[in-house]
Structure formats: C-alpha cells, structure tokens
Image (spheres, helix red, strand yellow):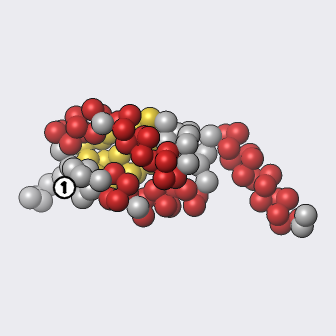
Amino acid sequence: MSEPSQLNELLEGLLADLGVARPIDTAELVDRWDDLAGEPFAGRSRPVHLDDGALVVEVADGATATLLRYHETELIGRLGAELGQGLVSSIRTQVRRTQPGST
C-alpha cells in the first residue's frame, strides 16, 4: 500500500472517530438535497450544517419546519439508503430569516 493511501485511510478513520462526515458525503448531500428530500421539502429547505450525524436544515417557514420534523425518521432513512447509514442520525430545523426590506 502506498503512503498516500495509508494516510488517506488514517485520516478517514480519524474523521470517523471524531464524528465528522467525509467531505464528499457532505457535498453530495448538498448537491442532491432537492432529489433526496423530495416534495414538499425540495425548494423550501436546504442543508446548512452536518456535525456528528446531526443535520441542520434551513426551512422557508414554520409550517415546513413542522412538516419536516414530522417526517424526520422517513427522511433520515431515505438519506441513509442513498448516502450511507449513519451519515445523518438526527435533523434540526431553523427557519430562514428574511433580510429587512425583502419580500
């Protein structure tokens, strides 16, 4: 095994021990969010942070936050099936803040 491969495996192991998702997993989650989340969340939410399996999702409004919390288990299962079990273990929502003067 080459030194770069050994270093890569060591770093991946360290990140896993720390509970940090691999950057490629996180990037894929962001890139595929609308397809993975499906309706009614596509276009009304976006992932903003993933730490130790806890996914923070910004939503358009309180109604979407409530609906997402209601479907949390289903969405975690879908994300696990597509991106790997354990990548997301919980979801927390935050309502998008609008800028002053925006509509």
Q: Quadrant of the C terminus?
A: bottom left
Which residue occupies 24% across, 52% down?
A: 39
Residue at the image position 25 percent from the left and 43 percent from the top: 95
- Image quarter of residue 67: top left
Helix, strand or loop status at disc 1: loop
Query: In this view, which residue lies farthest toward the front?
Result: 81
Residue 74: name its quadrant.
Answer: top left
**Nearest to the observer: residue 67 or residue 10:** 67
Inspect the image, locate mark 1, and give the three-letter code of the amino acid beneath it: Gln
- Judge left or right: residue 102 versus residue 4: left
Q: List the residue tagged with mark 1.
A: 99
Quadrant where the N terminus is found in the figure: bottom right
How far across and how far down the image is residue 15, in percent? 68, 47
Q: Residue at x 78, y 55 (%)?
A: 9
Q: In this view, does 96 lie to the left or right of 16?
A: left
Residue beneath the point at 18% across and 52% down: 98
